[in-house]
Amino acid sequence: MAELSLEDIEFIKILANSDSTILQQGMNDSTRHRLDSQIGVILREYYKENTMSVKSGWTKKFEKAGITEDDGKSAIACARRLGIDIS
């Protein structure tokens, strides 16, 4: 299981606190790739842990990084609006 880097934490917090329309307008290929390949994977695992009782440890990692449950839900919702498959 991977650890959350500072960059991952910041990216998740940005997703949790941003308007997806604004993010989509400013998104370049590099950002889209990171969202698809890394942040999306983390959010999918976090989602599974919180909806399907899959023990992956992401909830504790989010808490340790100062990412609340509401932040996690908001980040997932924003990622979905950006076209990232979370479920």
Image (cartoon, rainbow, N blue to C red):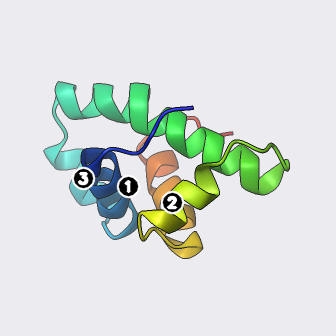
Quadrant of image for the N terminus: top right
The Cα atoms of the two marked residues, 3 and 1, are separated by 12 Å
Does label 3 or label 1 sit earlier along the sequence? 1
**Residue drawn at (34%, 70%) of the image:** 17
Which residue is identified by label 2? 62
Q: Give the number of the disc on residue 23.
A: 3
Task: Say whether disc 3 or disc 2 marks the residue closer to the N-terminus.
Answer: 3
Q: Is residue 66 above or below residue 51?
A: below
Amino acid, disc 2: Phe
Location of residue 73 (image quadrant): bottom right
**Is residue 5 shown left or right of residue 44?**
left
- Residue 84 visible in the snapshot: no
In terms of sequence position, does the residue under pointer 2 or pointer 1 come before the other? 1
**Image depth: mark 3 or mark 2 in front:** 2
| Tag 3: amino acid | Leu
Q: Is residue 62 left or right of residue 32?
A: right
